[in-house]
Amino acid sequence: MHGKIDLHKLPPLKALKGFEAATRRQSIRDAADELCLTHPAVSHQVQLIEDALGVNLFAQEGRHIVSTEQGRIFYPYVRAAFESLIEGVEAVHRNAPDKALRVQTYVTASIRWLARRMPHFLAEHPNIKLTLSTCAVEWEFDDIHADVGLVYCESLPDPARYHWIPLFDYALSTVCSPALRARLGPTPSVEDILKQPLAAVYTEVRNWNTWFESAGVAFDPASSYLVVDTLAVALEMALDGEAIALINGPFVSHDLAAGRLVKPVLHSTRCPGGWGLICRKDMQDNLRVRTFMDWVTRNAAETVLIPA
């Protein structure tokens, strides 16, 4: 049981918005514009707080205001209270039972692995709504706009903030069409790959250098390669026989099994980090989040990674 809060010690709560904005902007007028209030209305809110506390929170300097020592002391507490309330509101929204579970991943991971499995998940769990987003600007998990992520992390996420379930290693290997493979001859080498057109993802251009270096072959950045924006595009080029692509996850298992793609050489190299599921620590016991993460984890364990 929590003890009773003495609300009589608090200043008028509604007026705190005016104080916070005026302190942050160091201007009553700018605070009024931000809050869509009149200048006198914000001044009145500040006066209510000052009367309740019995101190001056601002001093007039010419046409401007500046925080007094008391104002500077009080502001961090007001700011922290607002931020805590906002976090509480977001927590309620995240845990709302009728709200769609927001899942973040990347274009290729969605198209070639996760999205094709989603109908099966929804059939098994018809009460869970899903929103799958692939438009994140950065690679990092966006815990403001997503509840769960299927992402790559180069190092383990902060365990104090995030719950992380590893799924796949980040291992680089090459794929191409059977027709392009035939052009390489019976026993192609890594050096032979260097002579072919290569497709490089703009966020992973150095992966080609990493792959060649791990095989002891110098990679000339002036080599013939085309930079594209997603691995999905690079794989389409590989399927069409136009280039060799580097893969780094389970995203071509179907094509390899069906013979639409082949691995031209045996060489592969493991990179730091790996693919996994991630959510905020305070969301890991949410029923919808736990159900989804458990289901994806089982599917990942059943995914067959075709060897070279």
Image (cartoon, rainbow, N blue to C red):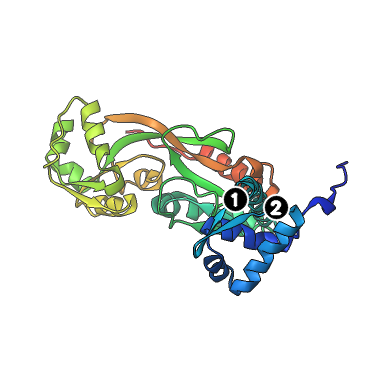
Q: What amino acid type is highlighted by mark number 2?
A: Val
| Pointer 1 or 2: first along the chain | 2
Q: Position of residue 31 (x, y in %)?
A: 56, 65
Residue at 63 percent across and 63 percent down: it is 18
Placement of the N terminus among the 4 image quadrants: top right
Residue at 64 percent across and 54 percent down: it is 57
Q: What amino acid type is highlighted by mark number 1?
A: Thr
Q: Which residue in the rendered view is the most extreme toward the front?
A: 62
Of 299 and 62, nearer the camera is: 62
Identify the residue position indicated by label 2 in the image.
55
In the displayed structure, does residue 66 sit left or right of residue 77?
A: left
Identify the residue position indicated by label 1 in the image.
68
Q: Position of residue 116 (x, y in %)?
A: 48, 55
Element type at mark 1: loop
Of 74 and 148, nearer the camera is: 74
In the displayed structure, does residue 180 sit left or right of residue 256?
A: left
Residue at 50 percent across and 36 percent down: it is 167
Judge whether residue 4 can be spotted in this image: yes
